[in-house]
Image: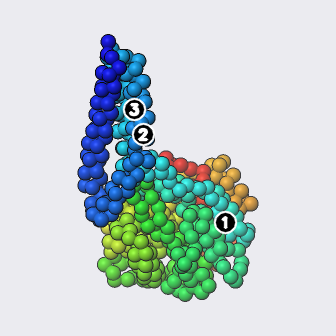
């Protein structure tokens, strides 16, 4: 049996041992912390940091030790003849608790961030002017910052659907003389971008020339919990003004090595100039280094410019290829170089097989991957199309009936369009409606809504 004196001596020894171990733990963790932090914290800052720890020792550390003194004292009193197996376990647990306490004190900041981090994710409502009704239609979509931490050369269905809605919102909001970009501004604000201090900029909405296109450029900081990136988003409007149609049908030849569509290439150059300025301006407001990502989308003429802009950004190595995300819809042909067909696997051109616009110019090709929508409409597609437009989608049978006619129309239009139309037994109004049904943003949104990854060819 241990007498009271021996118990007292033994207890004091335990306390000394605990304090000794604590000092060793502090020393080891101090060395480790210095090694980890010396690149970002000065020696003077470290000295101040540990002076603070020393000054707060009695108020923060000793109360913890006192708590464990009581635990060990209780164990010793319970086993007066020896420490005993249970007392040893309590002693070990006390030491583990001390270790855990110090570990939390010096816990790595990034590790904490990983455990608690969740991506910015929000369901949004996207407004856009309906082609048929002329009034604003609205559809739901989901924004998630994590889209831009997935592999950009793998088709992301959720990002594709979101892009179809944003490219629709890029068109002018109803018929107004002011704030024509209201719909795309509203959508991007919901996605976590802001319009303060010139962060969100709108170009060419009021007056578009033949070699111009209307578009929005904005940016925000995103994170995966380990590192932050600057995300620059560019949403490009499709053909809206009559003069833009003239440019669409002026492929020409630009001797850039790629021999791209003349008007599209010249228009892209204007957008790239603004992007280059915006990129350097925003990148240096905060030291992002190479942590910059770019997201580009557009419909029709906007899709062609988006495709070429993506190529230009990657070709000039302004942003790493792995950080450029591009989704386009109803994309016309952009380059005469067949060898570039299928290159740039991070560009996804989503095409409705019944849409004539992506077939033009017929002797041209596209950069990136062409993703073909299903050939036949479904009940879900028809339901969504009717919900958005208030109209019924023209059946595939009607398409087959006039397919030959409108293909000939584009070839022979300048010679004698009336003969072509009469020969097919249709009217210009029918032809226009059929082309519009297959080409409008409403159709692409409806298709994306009614499909998933496995439906794309």
N-terminal of the pair, mark 3 or mark 2, is 2
Q: Which residue is mark 3?
A: 69
Question: Which residue is at 35% across, 73% downward?
Answer: 318
Q: Nearer the viewer, residue 364 or 279?
A: 279
Q: Which mark is residue 64?
A: 2
Q: Which mark is residue 127?
A: 1
N-terminal of the pair, mark 1 or mark 2, is 2
N-terminal of the pair, mark 1 or mark 3, is 3
Q: Which mark is residue 367?
A: none
Quadrant of image for the N terminus: top left
In the rendered image, the vertical position of residue 200 relative to residue 4, given as above or below: below
Tell me residue 8's x, y (percent): 34, 25
With 261 as the anchor, is 82 left or right in this view?
left
Question: Which residue is at 40% across, 52% downward?
Answer: 56
**Residue 386 figure quarter:** bottom right
Query: Alpha carbon of mark 3 to alpha carbon of mark 2: how far?
Result: 9 Å
């Amino acid at each position: 049996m241990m007498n009271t004196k021996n118990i007292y001596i033994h207890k004091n020894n335990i306390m000394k041992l605990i304090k000794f171990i604590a000092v060793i733990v502090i020393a080891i963790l101090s060395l480790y912390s210095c090694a980890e932090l010396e690149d970002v914290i000065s020696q003077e800052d470290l000295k101040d940091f540990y002076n603070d720890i020393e000054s707060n020792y009695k108020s923060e550390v000793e109360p913890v030790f006192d708590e464990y003194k009581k635990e060990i004292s209780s164990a010793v009193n319970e086993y007066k003849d020896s420490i005993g197996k249970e007392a040893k376990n309590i002693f070990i647990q006390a030491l583990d608790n001390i270790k855990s306490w110090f570990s939390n004190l010096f816990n790595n900041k990034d590790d904490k961030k990983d455990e608690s981090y969740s991506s910015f994710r929000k369901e949004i409502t996207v407004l856009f002017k309906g082609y048929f009704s002329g009034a604003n239609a609205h559809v739901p979509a989901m924004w998630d910052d994590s889209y831009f931490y997935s592999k950009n050369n793998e088709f992301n269905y959720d990002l594709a659907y979101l892009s179809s809605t944003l490219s629709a919102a890029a068109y002018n909001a109803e018929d107004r003389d002011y704030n024509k970009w209201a719909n795309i501004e509203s959508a991007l604000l919901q996605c976590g971008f802001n319009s303060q201090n010139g962060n969100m900029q709108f170009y060419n909405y009021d007056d578009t020339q033949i070699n111009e296109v209307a578009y929005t450029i904005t940016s925000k900081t995103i994170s995966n919990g380990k590192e932050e990136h600057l995300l620059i988003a560019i949403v490009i409007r499709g053909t809206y003004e009559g003069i833009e149609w003239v440019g669409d049908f002026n492929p020409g030849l630009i001797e850039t090595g790629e021999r791209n569509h003349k008007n599209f290439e010249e228009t892209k150059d204007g957008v790239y100039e603004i992007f280059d300025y915006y990129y350097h301006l925003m990148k240096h407001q905060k030291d992002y280094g190479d942590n910059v990502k770019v997201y580009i989308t557009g419909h029709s003429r906007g899709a062609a410019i988006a495709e070429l802009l993506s190529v230009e950004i990657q070709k000039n190595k302004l942003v790493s290829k792995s950080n450029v995300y591009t989704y386009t819809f109803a994309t016309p042909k952009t380059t005469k170089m067949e060898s570039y067909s299928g290159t740039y696997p991070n560009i996804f051109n989503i095409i409705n097989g019944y849409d004539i616009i992506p077939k033009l110019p017929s002797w041209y090709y596209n950069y990136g991957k062409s993703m073909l929508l299903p050939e036949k409409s479904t009940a879900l597609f028809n339901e969504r199309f009717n919900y958005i437009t208030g109209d019924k989608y023209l059946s595939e049978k009607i398409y087959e009936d006039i397919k030959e006619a409108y293909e000939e129309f584009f070839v022979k239009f300048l010679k004698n369009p009336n003969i072509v139309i009469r020969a097919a037994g249709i009217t210009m109004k029918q032809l226009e409606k059929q082309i519009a049904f297959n080409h409008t943003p409403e159709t692409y949104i409806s298709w994306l809504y009614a499909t998933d990854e496995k439906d794309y060819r």
